Image (cartoon, coloured by chain):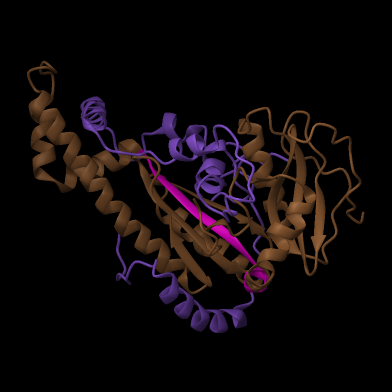
């Protein structure tokens, strides 16, 4: 059942959560939590949850970035990164895109506006930004 | 086909528990021979109660859970259901004493809450857009945009690392801050590009220092193609700069919440 990641030549990879990292980011601190009194406590689970969340920039991070800059080859242009992206480009499975149902878009848009407000999660609207 | 719950040797009451993966509508059917977590894996079945069903398997609670395989199985099981039926995913690690407790203390006790949450997920699934900066590309970008960073780079070049420690730390800090700013901006770009195709979205916190984008979208099944196309377009535009992936359809982990107190 394991589906390997399969970015199709620089396009968005499709299928399901691939690596363990994706799984960890998803199921350890998201999803429903059941009442403590119904639950049988298990050793180690809370620990797992905490471990999964720690991302703090530290001096070590800074030094690592500095070292990475130091190693940058000045003459290197933006495309000279075969080592980094090479292994991600394997198995470029293309997926077919069937005609989309545009009609649904309208309805959803209204709906989306509402739910976004409720979720309070969307970060404002920014204009087009090039990168 | 029909999920039944034949009892198994449950001799030592404390040794086994019922692991709960998620909550589904009561009218779903389960394929035979679905294997759950644990070693050996428990057989997955449905505990039905009223209009609801819980997806469960028996686990040995004397052994620690949380092997990589367990995590993967938990998610794959739920994600395999999501395209066909609404499912409320439980966070990893929910174990209840018995099937009877699942039926009554979990399902029956939260009947209305679960039923209405499931209704909201009808014909919808979650997709996650996840991008990571290509390190060399993003560093080049920052050096070309930030004079101080470029200057510090010259300063540490070929210099004794200890003697230039402060400069290195400052450079790294500038980079880290710059990446955070880019992350915010790029996250907005993704949000704007997909908002019209999604019912709701949640920005996930970065879990890696080079994370560019990590956003979950709740998408109606008939808008899945649009989401794919929009993601493809973004990925193409960022090629070489951000490795973008679209995950899904998956169970709606980011769009469920209970009022159940966590303690």
Looking at the rendering, in which quadrant would you find the C terminus of chain A? Answer: bottom left
Is residue A59 depicted above or below A28 in this figure? above
Q: Identify the hue of chain B.
A: brown
Does residue B111 lie above or below B74 as drawn? below
A34 and A90: which one is in front? A34
Give the residue drawn at x 32%, y 52%.
B183
Residue B160 magenta-highlighted: no
Which picture quadrant has residue B40? top right
Along the viewing direction, whichever of A47 and A6 lies nearer the viewer: A47
Q: Does the rendering let one see residue B124?
A: yes
**Whole-percent x and y of residue A70?**
21, 26
Q: Is residue B67 left or right of residue B128?
A: right
Which chain identifier belongs to the purple chain?
A
Image label count: 0
Q: Image quadrant of residue B229? A: bottom right
Q: Is residue A121 left or right of residue B83?
A: left
The x and y percentages for residue A92 are: 60, 43
Query: What segment is highlighted magenta in the picture?
Result: B117-134
User: Residue drawn at (60%, 50%), measured in percent from left and top?
Assistant: A37
x then y, percent, for residue B62: 68, 28
Image location (x, y in percent) of residue A111: 52, 81
> Which residue shows up at 40% across the image and 43% down it?
B207
């Amino acid at each position: 059942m394991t589906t390997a990641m399969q970015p199709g030549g620089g396009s968005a990879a499709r299928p399901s959560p691939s690596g363990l990292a994706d799984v960890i980011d998803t199921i350890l601190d998201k999803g429903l939590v059941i009442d403590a009194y119904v639950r049988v406590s298990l050793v180690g689970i809370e620990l797992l949850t905490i471990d999964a969340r720690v991302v703090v920039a530290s001096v070590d991070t800074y030094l690592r970035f500095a070292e990475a800059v130091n190693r940058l080859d000045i003459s290197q242009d933006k495309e000279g990164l075969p080592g980094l992206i090479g292994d991600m480009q394997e198995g470029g499975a293309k997926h077919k895109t069937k005609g989309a149902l545009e009609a649904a878009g309208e309805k959803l848009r209204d709906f989306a506006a509402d739910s976004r407000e409720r979720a309070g999660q969307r970060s404002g609207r920014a204009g087009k930004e090039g990168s | 086909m029909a999920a039944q719950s034949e009892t198994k040797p449950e001799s030592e009451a404390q040794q086994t528990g019922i692991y709960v993966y998620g909550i589904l509508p009561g009218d779903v059917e389960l394929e035979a021979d679905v294997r759950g977590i644990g070693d050996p894996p428990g057989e997955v079945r449905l505990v039905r109660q009223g209009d609801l069903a819980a997806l469960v398997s028996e686990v040995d609670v004397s052994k620690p859970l949380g092997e990589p395989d367990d995590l993967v199985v938990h998610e794959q099981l739920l994600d395999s259901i999501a395209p066909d039926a609404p499912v409320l995913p439980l966070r990893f690690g929910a174990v209840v004493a018995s099937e009877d407790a699942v039926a009554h203390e979990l399902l029956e006790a939260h009947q209305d809450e679960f039923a209405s949450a499931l209704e909201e997920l009808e014909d919808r699934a979650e997709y996650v857009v996840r991008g990571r900066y290509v390190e060399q590309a993003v560093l080049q970008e920052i050096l070309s945009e930030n004079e101080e960073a470029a200057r510090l780079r010259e300063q540490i070049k070929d210099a004794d690392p200890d003697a230039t420690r402060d400069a290195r730390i400052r450079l790294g800090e500038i980079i880290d801050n710059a990446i955070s700013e880019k992350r915010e901006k790029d996250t907005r770009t993704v949000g704007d590009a997909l908002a019209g195709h999604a019912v709701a979205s949640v920005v996930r916190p970065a879990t890696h220092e080079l994370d560019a984008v990590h956003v979950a979208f709740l998408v109606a099944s008939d808008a899945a193609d649009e989401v794919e196309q929009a993601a493809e377009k973004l990925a193409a535009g960022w090629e070489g700069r951000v490795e973008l992936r679209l995950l899904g359809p998956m169970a709606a982990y980011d769009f469920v919440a209970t009022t159940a107190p966590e303690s």
